[in-house]
Structure formats: structure tokens, C-alpha cells
Image: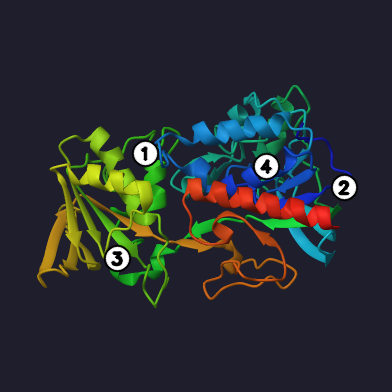
Amino acid sequence: MAEFKPVESQITADTLVVGGGIAGMTTAIETAEVGKKVILLEKNPSIGGRVATSFQYFPKLCPPTCGIEINLKRIRVSPHIRVLTLAEVESVSGTAGDYEVKIKLTPRYVNEKCTACGECEKVCEIERDNEFNYGLDKTKAIYLPHLMAYPPRYVVDPKSAGDERMKKCAEACEYGAIDLDMQPQTITAKVKALVWATGWKPYDATKIDNLGFGQYKNVITNVIMERYASKNGPTDGKIARPSDGKEITRIGFVQCAGSRDENHLPYCSAVCCLASMKQATYVREQYPEAEIHLFYIDVRSPGRMEDFYTKVQQDEKFFFHRGKVGKVTEKTDSGNIVLFAENTLTGEVVETEVDMAVLATGMVPNTVDAAPPLETELDEFGFIAPDGDKGVISAGVASRPLDVAASIQDATGAALKAINVGRRS
């Protein structure tokens, strides 16, 4: 099964998968289930990626526990998968079939003896911003990343590891699992194939000056909306106005927030329209009488998703406005948000007042900030080029914007490519 024992200085496998989100997990599982050894590497303390931060996802509108838990079970029982968290690739040398990879392991300060009992957390006196909830709340400095965290083990915020107060946490652990003297480690992995599944991040909405994010409290982004709706989110699943906790009577969804815009993201991220409609169902469940206003350039709901779009259109309190929001302001007396958009069908400027607004920001590949090794070709947007003949194999959103189901399909294809590389070597 997947191991968490102390890592030896050199390990071998058939495939190294970089990125432990839904695409990376799928690639690792599909490769391992044909008997190939896989190293699954994740830079964060837990695998699961962006899907783990979602409240629900398509096509069944089920929580991430549905898909991720199945994958975690397959990883736990696999004799061929080695999971390395808090791990990053430092360098790669060699050629397909014979790669040598230097991997840096950041200390967790909690070893494999941890049972996730939580006694250390109870006595911890230090807090940190919770990045899992986009900094909307705090956790203790020793924490379990989230409810589905794998490995199911606590981790210490490295900024607090040297704080004298952390010794109290170590003393509270009856299993001797907290080791505040852990040091970074560099190991070498010998592998035949490399798969890059490093996923995405939301476009930085503070760069979109005209839409009010960071300026008005009641303007949030689509990824933050997922956390507000989640039971383990900052509001325990209650969707309410950030400024005052007021219940929702009218909400606005602003599509293409920075997307299809030469000044920001020139491309369409493909999933945003459906994600906003999905989030509208969250509001509808909590506030059956609330009005929902969605502003769009054109609605993109390919394939079987068209049925969902049609169903939403039948909601008499769901209003679609054809027009991109050009300006957002705030009513100083009420904190309400006013959305200004030109109706592209009539030419009329529409002014709509809502309790809060949700910006549908696009998907930016993490390869923009951390390019893959081996002169891997990237397209003009930073995604791994589909027709590149050099470098690593891509999987999931490292290739292009994809929803969960499409990411899984793409990752299965990546697994087949990796297996073929191994066979040729």
C-alpha cells in the first residue's frame, strides 16, 4: 500500500506523477493497476487538489467525498503507489525511459506515528490563516489540512515550528509523533516516465479593477463561493453576505470575470458558466425565494450539460442577462452591490442591485509560474502544448481548462502514454 515511512535517499518507479489533484490521482491509480510502480508527488500536505475544496461538482452534483474517497481507497490498498507530500521537483535529467529526478521534501514536523487524534491541536496556542478556505478563517499552527486529508496526519506550519509554544503540542502527543527538529531532505528518484498534473489556480480577481473584488466586501469569487457553501467552510455551509451575515434575497453572478479579455485571460475556461449555475442551486436550496441574476457573454454548456442549463432556465426567479458586466459599485448605506452591464441584444445599459456578487474567474495553469522541466513546450497561455514532441506528459488542467470528468478522462490517457514510454525503454 501507499507508504509514509521515512523516505530513503534513492527510490525507483516506472512513473513519477507530479501533482496530487484529481488528474494526478487518476493517472497514478490507472498506471498502478496494470502493475507499474508509481510515485505520486504533491507539494501540499495532502493530496486531493482543487476538487477537495469544492462543495459539489458535475455531473451528479455530489460532494467531493464521492469521487475522492473512492480514489483514496484505491491508493491506500495499492502495493504500487508511493505518496510523497510536501514534495517538489528540484531538477530532472536524462531522457524518456531513464530519468533521474531530484526531489525536495519539506518537513511536516509530524511523523508516521500520528493517529490524527487531535490532542496536539487542542493545546496549541498559535493560529494561522487557513489557505484551504482562501484565508477566510484560521486554524491552529498544528492542523489537519481538511476532513479528507491524505495522508491522514497533522502538519505543523513551518513558520511556527521554531516557536517555543509548539513544545506544548509535542508534549501533548502520547505517541511521540511530533518532531520539531525535522530537516528538509533531498532524495533521488529513478523513473521511466514523467507525468505533469500540476493543476490550476483561479485568476487573481484583484487585477480586475472595475469589478470590485478586494474593494467591496460583498464581492467574492467563484472558488470562495464553493467554500461558503461547504459544511467545512468558514461559515459552516451557510451562504450569507460577507459584510454583515445578512441572508440572500438577490445575488449576481458575473461571468467571464477577466476571461476572454486581452488585458487578463484571453481564453474561455469552459467550466465557469456551468459552475455559476451550479452555485445558483446552492443559493436556491438555502433561499427558495431569492432572485438570481446571471450576466453572460454567451452561455457555454457543451454536450449533456445542456440539459442542466435548460433545467435552470425553467426557474422563474433565475434571470439571465446577456451582457458583460463593465462596472461594479457599492451602495454605501446598505452595502449592496450594483452591477452595470450593456444588454448586447438591446443596447440598453442594465443596472442591477444585489446583496452580493460572485465573480466567475477563470483557470490559470500552475505551469505559468512553475514551468515543467526538459524544455517542455507550452502554448501561448501557459498550458502544456498538445502537439509538443519534447518534455513531460501532461494530464488534466495542465493541458487545458477541463471539468472534473474531462480531467479524469485526460488523466487516463496520460497513464497510457506513461505505460507506453516504459514499454519502449
Is 39 rendered above or below residue 254? above
Q: Could you tell me if residue 168 is visible in this image?
A: no
First in sequence, mark 1 or 2: give its number: 2
Residue that label 3 marks? 211
> Mark 4: which amino acid?
Glu
State which quarter of the image contains the N terminus: top right
The residue lying at 79 percent from left, 64 percent from top is 91
Of the residues under marks 4 and 1, which one precedes in the sequence? 4
Looking at the image, can residue 318 be seen? yes
Question: Looking at the rendered structure, which numbered label has been put on residue 29?
Answer: none
- N-terminal label among 3 and 2: 2
Residue 74: % across, % down: 66, 32
CA gap, disc 4 and disc 1: 32 Å
Distance from label 3 to label 2 (Cα)?
Answer: 49 Å
Crowding at label 4, few (<14), some or many (≥20) Cα neighbours within 10 Å? many
Residue occupied by mark 4: 30
Disc number lying in front (4 or 2): 4
Image quadrant for the C terminus? Answer: bottom right
Q: Amino acid at mark 3?
A: Leu
x then y, percent, for residue 325:
24, 66
Viewer-proximal residue among 198 and 195: 195
- Label 1: which residue? 229
Vertical order, 42 against 361 (above or below): above
Q: Dot 2 corresponds to which residue?
A: 11
